[in-house]
Amino acid sequence: MMRTIHPGDAAYDTERDGFQQAGRHRPELIVAATGAADVREAVAYAADRELPIAVQATGHGLVSTAESGVLVSTRAMRGVRVDAQARTAWLEAGVRWQEVIEAAARHGLAPLSGSSPHVGAVGYILGGGLGLLARQYGYAADHVRAVEVVTADARPHRLTPDDELFGALLGGGGNFGVVTGLEIGLLPVTRLYGGGLHFPASADVLRAWRDWTETVPDELTSAIALIPLPDLPTVAEPLRGRHVAHVRIAYTGDAASGERLVAPLRQAGPILLDTLGELPYTESGAISNDPPFAHAYTGASAMLGDLDVDTAFALAGPGAPVPVVLQVRHLGGALAKPSAAVIGHRDARYALHVVSGLDGQDPASVRAAHRHLTKALNSSGAFPNFHYGPATAEQVRSAYDPDTYRRLTRLKAAHDPANLFRFGFAIPPTPGI
Ligand SMILES: Cc1cc2nc3c(=O)[nH]c(=O)nc-3n(C[C@H](O)[C@H](O)[C@H](O)COP(=O)(O)OP(=O)(O)OC[C@H]3O[C@@H](n4cnc5c(N)ncnc54)[C@H](O)[C@@H]3O)c2cc1C
């Protein structure tokens, strides 16, 4: 029997809780789903009553909160099934990357996971999925083989690349239904040369990294983050209380070639901490060392043709109008190759995002500062996964090329005319809205 939780029940707060603490869904009913049958029943219940439906696995990517309706919580759907021969894995809706990484590693394989192993694999893939090996292999969404989804009419579908809705889900997020599971391709990667170089934050380091990205092969994917670190014992001693530039590197070649490739970057400034070396893919979360603890944050993204270092440093460095963590990822390589997924801006050279903690900050002025920054950097559009918190219609539209966006609104009108799935990076059922 489907497990349901109502306001006032002891489990209500824990089941709706997630990584993002800036808001929480407040549904009239939570369905703690354990499988596809529960999801179908939950969607049928909501559709019969025209109730909106939110979906949550981990809460890392909460966009807007449901103040009524039904929340489908997938956190208990944690199955991973690896087919080593076919180099694929079947992922249930609530599985986190670390669980997939470990299951795949037992067969000498790896998924296209991202910086944080705690993120939900399915939510990440539906938003595109820009991972550690992205320049070599492309977006995680490019490697999906099949998707099982329950649409707003409560019908289950198994979709493959020939189905129009298949590509729309991959980059189109949770707009078209509840995905109960999907099949991904795995790659023969067991180890990396990677880790981080930490410098004192400066425009010169940002510039040196940008120029260096022009010289590296597709087997090397990197990012840079400018981070104001607190003066706390949990922060490595050389970085404590400093504004640092953290270059993150993942390279699938051997360590000696990795050292050679990175050598010019070491001249970018004084190195405060160097964690580069060989590591098993199972420890790839150490490269970015993203915060594992829940907190309140908001953020915006910008796909860029070029990186204007001085503007980025002025608006997102130590002198920024609001405190931000800036992150820029190097794109190109396999990311530029089209697939069925509806990911926009394949020709962008960098994906930038800014994230600000919301403790003691006014969310509206933080979001205005983020919008100002992405505009000043000539953003060609947003990347769905790197948008945190409420999104304007323009931000959503900007993630896709115009024809794709029109197609997505048409598909939305056909598959979810009552707009039951409206709490993610929301595509409306009419293009004008
Ligand atoms: C610390 C951190 C690191 C990150 N690193 C990366 C990275 O390296 N690369 C990258 O591309 N992204 C990254 N992200 C972004 C992340 O991929 C998105 O926030 C993603 O939406 C998280 O999915 P989730 O299931 O964990 O989160 P949730 O908040 O549970 O889900 C987010 C949204 O996804 C949709 N969704 C989730 N599951 C389903 C489902 N089964 N069916 C339909 N819709 C569903 C819903 O719209 C939901 O609101 C990172 C985020 C954080 C906070």
Image (cartoon, rainbow, N blue to C red):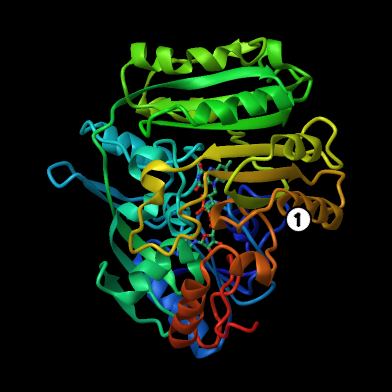
In the image, 24 versus 333, the foreground residue is: 333
- The spot of residue 18 in percent (x, y) is 61, 51
Residue at screen point 68% across, 20% down: 234
Q: Amino acid at mark 1?
A: Arg
Q: Residue 1: tell me if it is visible.
A: no
- Determine crowd level at label 1: few under 14, some 14-19, many 20+ residues with C-alpha closer than 10 A: some
**Horizontal and vertical percent for residue 129?**
45, 50
Q: Is residue 14 left or right of residue 1?
A: right
Q: Quadrant of residue 332?
A: top left
Which residue lies at the image location 36% right of the left edge and 28% below the top edge?
A: 281
Q: What's the residue at 86%, 54% (across, down)?
A: 365
Q: In this rendering, is residue 272 above or below 299?
A: above
Residue carrying label 1: 371
Q: Is residue 96 above or below residue 287?
A: below
Task: Count the numbered circles shown.
Answer: 1
Does residue 122 sit above or below 395 in this rendering? above
Of residues 138 and 114, the one nearer the viewer is: 138
Q: In the image, is residue 414 above or below residue 112?
A: below
Q: Quadrant of residue 392?
A: bottom right
Q: Residue drawn 44% across and 22% down?
A: 194
Q: Is residue 311 left or right of residue 19?
A: right
Location of residue 308 by image quarter: top right
Query: In the shown orientation, is residue 183 left or right of residue 117?
Result: left
* Label 1: which secondary element: helix
- Could you tell me residue 201's position as x and y percent? 72, 23
| Quarter occupied by the N terminus | bottom left
Q: For the view shown, which residue lies furthest in the left direction?
A: 85
Q: Residue 280, percent across and down?
A: 35, 22
